[in-house]
Image: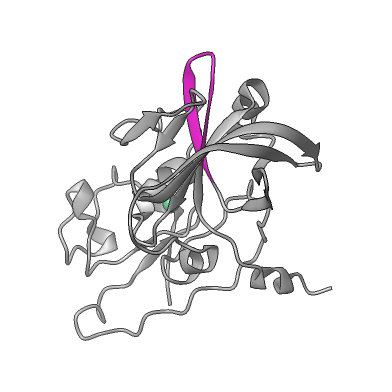
């Protein structure tokens, strides 16, 4: 059995949000599907270890923000590689409280759905939730990010909690070295797959373009998942 065959399935990139006792949380999921048209129902598969999963079980509501191709990796990192048990994922994020009472993330969304759970199925590590869509809105023009685009164009990885996780992923094709970056190696985060490119630096965190990985301060951490510098491996 060749499990790589499964990687030919197409998926999207979504922020799933829910609420419990007034506390909000959200996470990235790739498995949202419309399952019926009349009434409009969708399904989402969430890992039982995720806080958002417990919130959906408790409140029976969730929202879906369908992310655009332009969504920056640090945004995906916050919702996909950090836990709401440790950080407040909504700091600096543009959202509104929807009709179900759950937050609806608006940043980087091309459209949003609000859903009430009508059924669920225990599938071992995950729960599949079926829900009726009670509100929906197109937020912005642009292409929705597919899971394939996330992997190939953004260099993204799947966390262990993803239903589609595979231990050894096919590496993204490496960029051809140019004159400018030939002397400075790229480094990849072993936790989330973020690539530090010295040609770009990390301007959001005060690292100027042209800064070699070796010259980053020891306090620098992965801008996507927060892993320390020694979690990075030299590429190529
Ligand atoms: Fe990382």
Q: Nearer the viewer, residue 58 or 86?
A: 58
Magenta region's main secondary structure?
strand
| Quadrant in the rendering for residue 154 | bottom left
| Quadrant in the rendering for residue 234 | bottom left
Q: Residue at x 40, y 33 (%)?
A: 89
Residue 211, position in %: x, y?
19, 62
First to last magenta residue range? 16-28
Image vertical order of residue 230 relative to residue 62, above or below = below
Image quadrant containing the N terminus: bottom right
Residue 196, position in %: x, y?
33, 62
Image vertical order of residue 195 relative to residue 163, above or below = below
| Quadrant in the rendering for residue 236 | bottom left
| Residue at the top extreme, as displayed | 21
Residue 222 visible in image = no
| Residue at the front extreme, as displayed | 38
Q: Is residue 98 left or right of residue 33?
A: left
Q: Is residue 152 left or right of residue 198?
A: right
Q: Residue at x 33, y 59 (%)?
A: 141
Q: Is residue 8 left or right of residue 111?
A: right
Residue 215 visible in image = yes
Q: How many marks?
A: 0
Residue 101, position in %: x, y?
48, 23
Residue 25, position in %: x, y?
49, 29
Residue 67 is covered by the magenta coloring: no
Q: Residue at x 22, y 47 (%)?
A: 205
């Amino acid at each position: 059995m060749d499990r790589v065959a499964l990687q030919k399935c197409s998926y999207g990139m979504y922020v799933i949000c829910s609420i419990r006792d007034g506390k909000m949380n959200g996470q990235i999921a790739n498995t949202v599907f419309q399952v019926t048209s009349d009434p409009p129902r969708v399904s989402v598969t969430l890992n039982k270890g995720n806080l958002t999963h417990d919130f959906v079980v408790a409140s029976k509501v969730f929202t879906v923000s369908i992310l655009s191709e332009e969504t920056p990796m640090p945004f995906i990192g916050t919702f996909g590689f950090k836990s709401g048990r440790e950080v407040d994922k909504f700091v600096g994020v543009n959202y509104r409280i929807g009709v179900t009472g759950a937050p609806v993330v608006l940043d980087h969304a091309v459209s949003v759905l609000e859903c009430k759970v009508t059924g669920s199925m225990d599938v071992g590590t995950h729960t599949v939730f079926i829900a009726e869509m009670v509100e929906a809105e197109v937020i912005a023009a642009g292409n929705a990010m597919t899971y394939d685009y996330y992997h190939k164009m953004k260099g993204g990885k799947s966390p262990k909690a993803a239903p589609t996780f595979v231990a050894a992923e096919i590496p993204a094709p490496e960029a051809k070295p140019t004159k400018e970056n030939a002397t400075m190696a790229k480094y990849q985060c072993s936790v989330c797959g973020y690539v530090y490119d010295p040609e770009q630096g990390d301007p959001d965190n005060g690292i100027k373009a042209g800064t070699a990985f070796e010259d980053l301060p020891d306090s620098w951490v992965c801008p996507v998942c927060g892993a320390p510098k020694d979690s990075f491996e030299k590429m190529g």
